[in-house]
Image: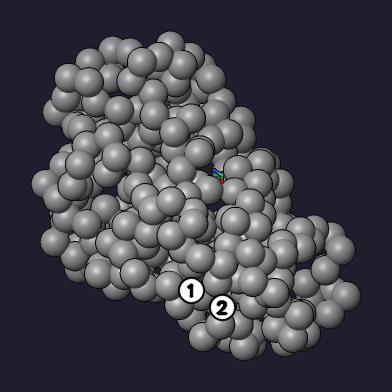
Amino acid sequence: MNKRDLLSVTDLSAEELHLVLDLAERPISALGRPLEGLGAALIFEKPSNRTRQSMEMAVVQLGGHPVYTRGEEIQFDVRESVEDVARTMSGYHGVLGARVFRHEVVERLARAATVPVVNMLSDRSHPMQALADVLTMHQVLGRLSGRVVAWVGDYNNVARSLGEACVMLGAQVRYATPDGYGPSSVELQRLEALGPGSVEASVQPEVAVKGADAVHTDTWTSMGQEAEKAQRLETFRGYTVTTDLMRAAAPGAGFYHCAPVYREVEVATEVVDGPQSCVVRQGHNRLHASRALLAFLAGVRS
Ligand code: CP
Ligand code: NVA
């Protein structure tokens, strides 16, 4: 496979992002078996359900062989360096995937590997989630250009990647986060510069959600932030996506969450389990988006 990494959504051009979304809608048989005879090392320093399952099955559907590997086994920079892992594994596999605590670890993997490296979630970004999220919104809403996408909660890895993808596709993104947990002004400018979409930030969920076509949230305490959990529960009080808050959105607006979901914390049970919820579809779309991205990295273009 040609060396091409996906560490963030912005590693794709807008045209390539559209192509990946298009490939995700194709039947499996239309993509062929571009990973035939190739391995895919999937390294996880953190727990996972959706990402592991969808990536493994995507590799299988493209004719390859996934090798799930726990971070404890590899022990980056303890048992051997990140670079030694990358160089060695490049001899066994057609692609490397990694879920890491520190984003710089996927960057180092990508620099040292001679095969593509895919970020399967870092503290900075979660591009594979964003691909599934925009795919899901595209299926529900049609073209995202001009659509209003609200994010309520923490400006975290998922929020950043979603914002990148949405701006590239021309959507209007509105973040509502507690003071100190939102995008900086520099970050807002960076997002705005990525494409035709726009970005606004406030501290008021009602402002972000008003008239929105899609309302997104995520856990208030990401993996690696467990020590801050009690303080975060306090700080984010008032940012729960409730039925009342959903009433401020456009009629029939979808509710989105990357999952795992913490009911009655960041979202009310009746919202996540109600008719507006797109969460199960988002989860299933992880497979279709992963298959499309891997096929793209393997050179499939049409
Ligand atoms: N959304 C997501 O990445 O889920 P997992 O942590 O279960 O992989
Ligand atoms: N923001 C969450 C996403 C989990 C899929 C985390 O990083 O833990």
Where residue 297 appears, as percent x and y from the top left, is: 48, 73
Tell me if residue 100 can be seen: no
Q: Marks 1 and 2, Cα distance to the nearest angstrom?
A: 7 Å
**For residue 32, which numbered disc appears in the image?**
none
Q: Is residue 139 left or right of residue 290?
A: left
Residue name at image x 17 percent, y 55 percent: 170
Q: Nearer the viewer, residue 168 or 115?
A: 115
The quarter of the displayed image where residue 260 is located: top right
In this rendering, is residue 94 above or below 272? below
Q: Measuring 29% from the left and 40% from the top, which residue is drawn there?
A: 139
The secondary element bearing badge 1 is classed as helix
Q: Quadrant of the C terminus?
A: bottom left
Is the CB of the residue bearing disc 2 within 8 angstroms of ligand 1?
A: no
In this view, the mark in front (1 or 2): 1
Amino acid of disc 1 = Leu
Residue that badge 1 annotates: 297
Label 1 close to label 2 by CB (< 8 Å) = yes
The tag earlier along the polypeptide, 1 or 2, is: 2
Vertical order, 298 against 220 (above or below): below
Q: In terms of image quadrants, where is residue 15?
A: bottom left
Q: Quadrant of ligand 1?
A: top right
**Residue nearest the observer in this picture, 174 or 98:** 98
Disc 2 marks which residue? 116
